[in-house]
Amino acid sequence: MQWYDVIFFIVSLIIIILSLLQGGKSEGASGAITGGGLNVFAKTKERGSEKVVTWLTFGFAVVFLFLALVISVVSGNASSGEASSSVAALM
């Protein structure tokens, strides 16, 4: 396990925790059955901690995507280097 795998794991756990901290944006199926949620088009803005959690989730998602691409490139270079060295050893 490399150092970037540990960072990738920590970032993914942070994203999971932040996603669980976010409140639901709608009532879902229960609101449709009971008739609740009649203010569908009401303008509600996130404020305070909700907004901070949303922005943190977005930021860590961008970091997650960047790390996934970097790890993919680094792992691709490492595996191609190992493959070429093993082929050279066979010849």
Image (cartoon, helix red, strand yellow):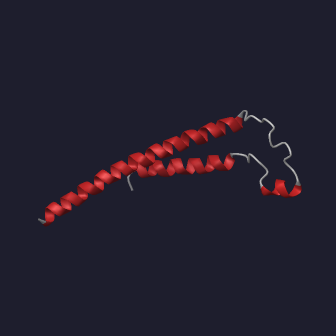
Q: How many marks?
A: 0
| Quadrant housing the N terminus | bottom left
Q: Residue furthest left?
A: 91
Q: Residue furthest bottom?
A: 90
Residue 88, given in percent of the width and then of the height, sits at: 14, 60
* Residue pictured at 20% horizontal, 58% vertical: 84
**In the shown orientation, is residue 23 left or right of residue 5?**
right
Residue 40 or residue 62, whichever sits in front: 40
* Residue pictured at 72% horizontal, 35% vertical: 46
Residue 44, given in percent of the width and then of the height, sits at: 77, 36
**In the shown orientation, is residue 91 left or right of residue 17?**
left
Give the vertical position of 57 relative to 20 (above or below): above
Q: Residue furthest front?
A: 41
Give the vertical position of 35 relative to 43 (above or below): below
* Residue pictured at 14% horizontal, 66% vertical: 90
* Residue pictured at 85% horizontal, 58% vertical: 33
Residue 74, given in percent of the width and then of the height, sits at: 34, 49
Residue 70, given in percent of the width and then of the height, sits at: 39, 46
Give the vertical position of 33 relative to 66 (above or below): below
| Quadrant housing the C terminus | bottom left
**In the shown orientation, is residue 13 left or right of residue 74?**
right
**In the shown orientation, is residue 23 left or right of residue 80?**
right
